[in-house]
Image (tube, rainbow, N blue to C red):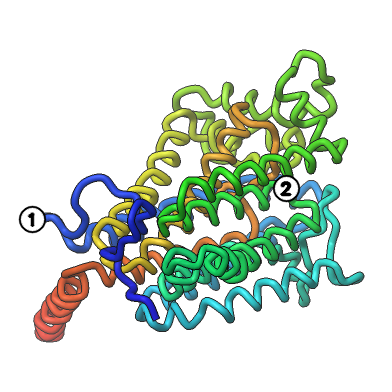
Amino acid sequence: MADDTRAVRHGPGRWLRRTGADGPVKGESSTLSYYALLIATLSLLAFGLIMVFSVQSVTAAADGGNAFTTFTKYLAFAAVGLVGMVVLSRLPLRALKRLAWPALIIAFGLQLLVFIPGIGIDVYGNRNWISLPAGLGTAQPSEFIKLGLCLYLGTMVSTRQDAFLGGVDTGRKLFRFLGWVVTPAGVGIGLVMAGGDLGTVIVLTALVAGALWLGGLGWRWFATLGTVGLVCFAGASMLSANRRARILSWLHPERYDPLDVGYQPQHGRYALGTGGWWGVGPGSSRQKWGYLTQADSDYIFAVLGEEFGLVGTLLVILLFAVIGWCCLRIIRRSDSLYVSVVTGGIMTWIVGQALINMSVVVGLLPVLGVPLPLVSAGGSALISVLLAVGVLLAFARNEPGTPEALRSRAGAVRRTLAVIAPRRRKRV
């Protein structure tokens, strides 16, 4: 088994892209990554819960339902995700490595359910959802493929370095690389593409690229696989009339009917423009009243901008930037190749998906159907992102000096409570 450290080098193809020295810097806080990541995640989750309730209070009433009942179901997903986040954050690295294969196999198995009649559900031409029992709604198994691939790639790159970067037998290295890395990633991406969800395929592809970049894959591989990916993307776009219309309406908005394919992008920009600097106030959005059909998912950033203004949107962007910075800090301070690869994949997934969603809303990209992590409605998406954050928190807890600092702070809290409790009893 190869050594799982970033100190391992293989000539020009280095395992880690880096500028400057790695490792802890004298005088810096050992717990900053942990607390900053936790606060940013919980802040985005709070924003998301507020916005989801704001939109669902309208959509549920329009359908004759109870907004509080609908939102309570969504809170159940958030609670499950938070519990999973806490559990994963306390696991040691060796336990997380053991989860790689089971997580990926289970995710693939769930994705296969979307093709079974009566279980799989077709939504807007994409067959990537399954119905849940007990009236819980639907789930999107492809969200769990993202986390499964991150864990799997980290394990494969760190434990099988010689499979595709070591040795002298180029043909054998190529065969192993295709078998251990490209094939499993291709199976996951292919299963999602078979359901027609091109937006999720783009995120998965970016995730794999981010993980392998931190793993040190050579630029020739990126050029080759990138070219293949662009050809496949162009083919998938041209073969679908809906995708083709979205791209053309983005390139030439003046040529397309604003009441048809250009309707939602236009109203998304209306929402952002109406919000101004400070917004119209929480719950006061106008565009969520039937104008934005995806107001609680793909276009929730537009409603957020309308209700909280430019200040609110910049705050959300800043929180995602904090998550990205925390990921980079974890990579820099860790000497584990496994941690670097998994963190690189999760960072590309969460921050990259957020950039794609916000770029679509402001008109920098054509409509792709990608939700905003932690903010958009979607139970399975919320759980998968919170589980991924739990993995990052586990990495942050294992940074040099962090376990000792967290234990000392916990001990200080216990000592303080031990002093306060008797005093309170005496006063009573």
Q: Secondary structure at mark 2?
A: helix
Q: Residue at x 52, y 71 (%)?
A: 152
Q: Is residue 387 visible?
A: no
Query: Disc 2 vs disc 1: Cβ atoms closer than 8 Å?
Result: no
The residue nearer to you, when weighing 108 against 275, is: 108
The crowding category of the residue bearing disc 1, from other C-alpha atoms within 10 Å (few below 14, some 14 to 19, many at least 20), is few
Residue 18 position, x and y percent, is 29, 49
Depicted 351 relative to depicted 149: above or below:
above
Residue 95 is left or right of residue 148, and the answer is left
Q: Residue at x 15, y 85 (%)?
A: 425
The amino acid on which the numbered mark 2 sits, given as a three-letter code, is Leu
Give me the C-alpha separation between circle 2 and circle 1.
Answer: 46 Å
Residue 259 position, x and y percent, is 83, 24
Kindly indicate the quadrant of the structure image that contains residue 378: bottom right
What residue sits right under mark 2 in the picture?
A: 198
Quarter of the picture holding the C terminus: bottom left
Q: Is residue 166 visible?
A: yes
Residue 260 is left or right of residue 104, and the answer is right
The residue nearer to you, when weighing 222 against 427, is: 222
Residue 27, label in figure: 1
Residue 201 position, x and y percent, is 67, 52
Residue 130 position, x and y percent, is 78, 67
The amino acid on which the numbered mark 1 sits, given as a three-letter code, is Gly
Depicted 177 relative to depicted 109: above or below:
above
Quarter of the picture holding the N terminus: bottom left
Q: Residue at x 63, y 31 (%)?
A: 365
